[in-house]
Image (tube, rainbow, N blue to C red):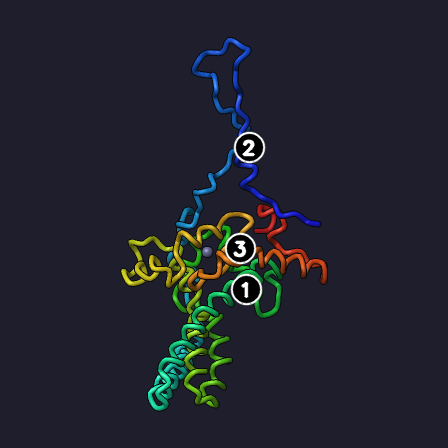
Amino acid sequence: MPQRKNPSMSLTHVPICSGTTTAMPRSSQNELFIDPRLVTTPDLVTPIIPSAGPPLANDPSFQSTWPHRAWVTSGCITLLISLAKAIVGAADSHMWLETILAGYVGYILADLLSGIYHWVIDNYGDASTPIFGSQIADFQGHHKQPWNFTRHQFAKNLHVPARSVTLYMLPIDIFCNEPVIQGFVSICAGCIMFSQQFHTWSHTTKSKLPPLVVALQDAGVLLSRSQHSAHHRPPYNSNYCIVSGVWNKLLDKYKVFEALEKFIFFKLGVRPRSWSDPGAEW
Ligand SMILES: [Zn+2]
Ligand SMILES: [Zn+2]
């Protein structure tokens, strides 16, 4: 059975020389002798803050295009229509409590869905995979250079989920008049569409964030920097959820994604990327 690599193990076993039988200088006694092969970046230091040289400001790979802006605009419009129908429907039917609760469930579920999606694209497929290839390549690049999403312009960051939201929300906007359903889907789809922005904010220094965003991160409403930093340690196999991160502890404690990876491996013979040497593919 394939075993996960545990890089923290290699960092904790540091040989100690007692120096009790030789006449060593006192300053050398009890000295830590560290195998150079074991010297690496300490576990608590995670390169989540931009650590490499910033890219050129006019790098086209970081800039939004007009199609990107069009998809984000259409995504926002479909979300606003859904939200408006939820509010108007709740007012007409006096179903405020049910509609608000449905929105809260949508917010909680969005975090779980963001984690599942992130786990899939981190572990399966590659840049040549249809539809998802560019996202897979972007996230692999993000593991190598955690600052990259913070350099993306807004629509460049959000156009992929915005496209999905537009296509899924449009028929719901047109045919559904149930405020509870609209409350659920508008908040759930909205959190999924903006999850990449929440993710980007978790990589941004506090001094560069609006105070409201910092307050929401500190309150646990949005993904916090400290929680997401745990994802950026090889082999990048924990803390996948990027809306609020509320599911991360539970999913990691019960090794839900590991169980799914083993199930997929035994059923389909496909190994997730997180079982490989991070240096080789990430
Ligand atoms: Zn990742
Ligand atoms: Zn990240």
Q: Which residue is mark 2?
A: 13
Identify the image quadrant of residue 272: bottom right
User: Is residue 66 something one can see in this rendering?
Assistant: no
237 or 258: nearer the eye? 258
Q: Position of residue 23 (x, y in %)?
A: 51, 8
Identify whether 107 is placed above or below 257: below
Identify whether 108 is placed above or below 271: below
Labels 2, 3: front one: 3
Q: Name the outermost residue toward the left.
A: 211
Q: Position of residue 101 (x, y in %)?
A: 40, 76
Q: Position of residue 257 (x, y in %)?
A: 58, 58
Q: Which residue is mark 3?
A: 252
Q: Which residue is mark 1?
A: 116
Q: Residue at x 31, y 58 (%)?
A: 214
164 or 180: nearer the eye? 180
Provide the secondary structure element on which disc 1 rests: helix
What's the distance in space between the residues labelled 3 and 1, CA to CA?
A: 12 Å
Identify whether 87 is placed above or below 219: below
Whether the residue carrying mark 2 lies under 8 Å from ligand 1 is answered with no
